[in-house]
Amino acid sequence: MFNLIRRDAILQKKMLLTFIPFILVFIIIDSHHPAFIFLVASIFIPFNAYSYDEKAETNILLNSLPYTRKEIIAARYLGSILYTLLAFAVTSITLFIFNRPFTLTDIAIGGGLFLLFAAFTFPLFYILKPGHISMVVIIIFLVLAALGPPIVRFLAEHFTAITIFINDLSTETLYMGTTLVILTLYAISWIVTTIIYQRKAF
C-alpha cells in the first residue's frame, strides 16, 4: 500500500515543483486568512493525484497490479492525510520565513476543512464520468468558499439556540466534538468510496 502512496509523489514530481510558488501567491497577496492558506495547501497534492488519474485512466492499470480495490482506496485516503501533513509542514515553514503569523488553530481549521471537503468530493471521482470530475470539484470548492461564511453568519443570527449551545461548550469539548464529527464523516466517505469502487467496472 505504501508503494501506491509513493506512486502519487513520483507521478507528480514535476507538479510538486509548483507547490511552493503556488502557496507563495496566497502568502504574498496577504489578503487570505492563514487557515485558508493551509486548506489550499492540503488540497493541492491529493486532488492533483485524482486529476492525473482521471486524465491517464490509471484505474485500469491499478486493477492489473497485485492490490485489492480496498487497498487502492485505502492508499488514497491515508495518502491524502500523509500529504496534508507534509503540506502543512512546508506551508508553516514558508509562512514563518515570510513573517506571516499563524497558530495551531489555523492549522487545525485548515486540516478539518480539507477532510470535510475531501469526505464529500472523493466519492465523486468514482461516480462521475472522467473528464467532468475536476471541473465539478473546482466549482464545489469555489461555491463553498464564497457561500460558506455568509451561511455560517446566517445560521448564527437566526438559529440562536444553536449558537448559545455552542458558546456554552468549553473549547476542549468543541474541538474534540468537531474532530470526532469530521473524522466520522471521513471514515464514512472512505467506506462509501470503497463500496462504489468495488462495484465499478473498468
Image (cartoon, helix red, strand yellow):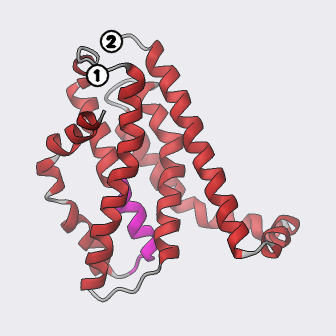
**Residue at 21% of width from left, 66% of height from top?**
20
In the picture, the quarter occupied by the N terminus is top left
Q: Neighbour class for label 2 at 10 Å: few (<14), some, many (≥20)?
A: few
Q: Regarding mark 1 in the picture, which secondary structure is present there?
A: helix
Which residue is found at the position 15% from the left and 42% from the top? 10
> Residue at left 46%, top 25%?
127
What x and y, as percent, mark residue 99?
30, 89
Mark 1: amino acid: Asn
Q: Which residue is label 1 attached to?
A: 59
Quarter of the image with the C terminus in it: top left
User: Can you say whether 165 is above or below 52 in the image?
Assistant: below
Above or below, 55 relative to 118: above
> Percent from the top left, x then y, of residue 147?
58, 60
Q: Quick check: 90 above or below 197?
A: below
The reply to whether discs 1 and 2 touch (Cβ–Cβ < 8 Å) is yes
Examine the structure image and report whether residue 32 is included in the region drawn in magenta: yes
Find residue 71 and name its label. none
The magenta span reads: 31-43
**Prevailing secondary structure class for the magenta stretch in the rendered image:** helix
Question: Looking at the image, which is closer to me, 109 or 132?
Answer: 109
Please, what secondary structure does the residue beneath circle 2 have?
A: loop
Badge 1: residue crowd in 10 Å (few <14, some 14–19, many ≥20): some
The part of the image, by quadrant, that contains residue 134 is top left
Q: Residue furthest right?
A: 161
Question: How far apart, in angstroms, are the residues tagged by discs 1 and 2?
Answer: 7 Å
Residue holding disc 2? 202
Image-quadrant location for residue 178: bottom right
Could you say where residue 194 lies in the image, as x and y percent from the top left? 48, 25
